[in-house]
Image: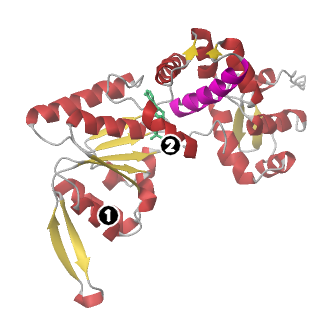
């Protein structure tokens, strides 16, 4: 379990409920999404109708679950939470859909990982609030139509492009969640510190925000680690020095790179002169699986502009040399 992973671990799940904003006003950042969603919800309320289906796309930890709960709260509706991988058979989905209350919000996380038959059942449910339940097998099978109460589906996915177009088209509103700016993460951190009854100054919050990879979940997690350190070493008070010393202990650097990220970058620079080098060679050099390097470390390094994936292999950017405090080799003439 990495401290800088966007996805939730067990500890996050226990604490996150307490830290989730409860209304659109409390939700930090994502101005455009908030503004548009506010209109969608208010218009539905004014019409006395259920809100359109909403698709939220974006990396883990950016607030998709939180927004779905806010949608339910703003509509004064109950919410049911499930995920694509939890729905193996169309029957699983039929059971959920048929037990929804009128106006209920159904949050379907990782909607791109639903099974095909369930997905096809969902098309009809979204459009006509109706499903056909197939009873029996082979030539004797019959479809029994089942009316559903109107509901609002909130689907979440890491990338909208992963969804088949017929599914994507059935959402009335699609929001692309972006990574957060450091100042926004500072607000998230101040808000969480307040809820957790912690004392933190502006510089302490900035220090944590800068290492949080644009992700509120990571910001909250780092804040908790810094809190532990501050309690033991500084009577609970968090300032820049405390935050930085704490995160040094946890090996999360100023830019949010952890030990694995630095190992990959370090090998690329020190062993291969900054590349190009093949993925497999690089993975062997850091003693990791190819997939770990490619899927766990590289996406953030690429996003940060420290590493480029080229047809000839992995290449370090000038920023990578600067970040590790190394001098790039002199350019060969020509
Ligand atoms: P996702 O569903 O996208 O993985 P979550 O909604 O579970 O992300 O959010 C992860 C954590 O980050 C939650 O504890 C939530 O409180 C916090 N969080 C996410 N977005 C925001 C935000 N805009 N403002 C404040 N806290 C946020």
Give the percent coordinates (x, y) of residue 109: 41, 49
Spatial distance from mark 1 to mark 2, Cα to Cα? 24 Å
As rendered, which of 90 and 199 lies closer to the eye? 199
Residue 13, numbered circle? 2
Residues rendered magenta in the picture: 216-233
Q: Confirm or reject: label 2 Cβ below 8 Å from ligand 1.
A: no
Which residue in the structure is indicated by mark 1? 93
Residue 266, numbered circle? none
Do tag 1 and tag 2 residues touch (Cβ < 8 Å)?
no
Give the percent coordinates (x, y) of residue 224: 60, 29
As rendered, which of 274 and 115 lies closer to the eye? 115
Identity of the residue furthest to the top in this view: 202
Element assignment for label 2 = helix
As rendered, which of 282 and 5 lies closer to the eye? 5
As rendered, which of 230 and 288 lies closer to the eye? 230
Residue 60 seen in render = no
**Residue 62, above or below 321:** below
Residue beneath the point at 29% across and 24% down: 35
- Decide if residue 89 is on the left or right side of residue 269: left
Q: How crowded is mark 2: few (under 14 residues within 10 Å), some or many (20 or more)?
A: few
Element assignment for label 1 = helix
């Amino acid at each position: 379990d990495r401290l800088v992973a966007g996805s939730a671990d067990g500890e996050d799940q226990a604490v996150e409920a307490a830290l989730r904003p409860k209304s659109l006003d409390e939700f930090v950042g994502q101005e455009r999404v908030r503004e548009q969603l506010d209109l969608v919800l208010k218009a539905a309320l004014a019409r006395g109708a259920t809100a359109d289906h909403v698709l939220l796309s974006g990396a883990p930890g950016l607030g998709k679950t939180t927004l779905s709960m806010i949608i339910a709260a703003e509509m004064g509706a109950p919410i049911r939470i499930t995920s694509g991988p939890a729905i193996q058979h169309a029957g699983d989905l039929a059971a959920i859909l048929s037990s929804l209350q009128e106006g209920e919000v159904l949050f379907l996380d990782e909607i791109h990982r639903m099974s095909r038959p369930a997905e096809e059942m969902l098309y009809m449910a979204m459009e006509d609030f109706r499903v056909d339940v197939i009873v029996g097998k082979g030539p004797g099978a019959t479809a029994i139509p089942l009316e559903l109460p109107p509901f609002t589906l909130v689907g979440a996915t890491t990338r909208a492009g992963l969804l088949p177009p017929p599914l994507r088209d059935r959402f009335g509103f699609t929001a692309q969640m972006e990574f957060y700016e450091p100042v926004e993460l500072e607000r998230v951190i101040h808000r969480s510190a307040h809820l957790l009854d912690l004392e933190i100054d502006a510089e302490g919050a900035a220090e944590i925000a800068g290492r949080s990879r644009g992700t509120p979940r990571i910001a909250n997690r780092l804040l908790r680690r810094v809190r532990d350190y501050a309690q033991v070493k500084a009577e609970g008070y968090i300032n820049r020095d405390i935050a930085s010393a704490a995160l040094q202990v946890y090996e999360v650097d100023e830019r949010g790179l952890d030990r694995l990220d630095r190992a990959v970058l370090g090998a690329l620079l020190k062993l291969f002169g900054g590349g190009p080098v093949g993925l497999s060679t690089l993975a062997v050099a850091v003693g990791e699986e190819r997939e770990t390097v490619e899927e766990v470390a590289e996406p953030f390094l690429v996003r940060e502009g420290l590493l480029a994936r080229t047809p000839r292999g992995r290449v370090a950017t000038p920023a990578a040399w600067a970040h590790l405090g190394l001098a790039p080799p002199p350019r060969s003439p020509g």
